[in-house]
Amino acid sequence: MSRAVVALGANLGDRGSTLRAAAAAIVALPGVRPVASSREVESVAVTLDGPDTTKPRYRNAVVVVDTDLEPQELLDALHGIEDTHGRTREVRWGDRTLDLDLVAYDDLSLDTVTLTVPHPRAGERAFVLAPWHDADPDAVLPGVGPVADLLERVGDDTERVDEPRLFDEPTRASRPETSDS
Ligand code: ADP
Ligand code: MG
């Protein structure tokens, strides 16, 4: 069993409903179970040309799960959930109904054509770090450092949305530890 961190983002459609539906779909995957989730944050869209205030704003959140799926299997399943929500892929970093990124998978460091873990930009993005810290205040970005420190460094320019966490967390008080098996 491995512990995985997934970042969710949306800037088109009913963003909050999409994020909640996506979180439910993630933890409903065979071989995946919920550990913790964040509340939502909102922030300005970032495109390849930088922040763009003319674009619809993003909602972002993070879910932490335990999984038996291998990293690429999990990413494939995440892409399937994106597709269910009408995701198209015309423009890298373009507007989207749903983006699901695999931020971290245990302490694994992996770099293939289709998957880089930890996600290379996670440590610079307040819209990933802030909800990740919200879901798990003790989180560490593998090979980099505590999420709390990274968030302090980049500065939290996100706005907290006044909505509940993406899913109820039966294990929040006593999260199972990752085993090495
Ligand atoms: P972006 O999220 O950068 O806007 P996409 O969601 O369209 O772009 O993803 C582009 C590609 O990034 C995907 O096809 C996927 O194979 C690759 N990728 C590499 N590492 C990761 C990761 N850790 N999480 C999600 N996608 C990744
Ligand atoms: Mg993506």
Image: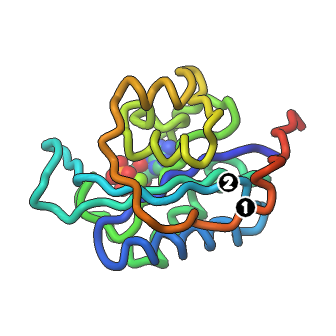
Q: Is residue 41 above or below residue 28?
A: above
Contact (Cβ within 8 Å) of mark 2 with mark 1: yes
Residue at the front extreme?
Answer: 162
Residue at disc 2, secondary structure? strand
Residue 157 pos. (x, y %): 30, 42
- The residue pinned by badge 1 equals 169
Residue at disc 1, secondary structure? loop
| Side (left or right) of 44 relative to 108 | left
**Residue type, numbered disc 1:** Glu
Mark 2–mark 1 distance (CA, rounded to whole Å): 6 Å
**Residue type, numbered disc 2:** Ala
Question: Along the polypeptide, which appears first: circle 2 or circle 1?
Answer: 2
Residue 180 pos. (x, y %): 86, 33
Q: Quadrant of the C terminus?
A: top right
- Frontmost residue, 32 versus 39: 39
| Side (left or right) of 137 relative to 56 | right
Q: Is residue 180 above or below residue 27?
A: above
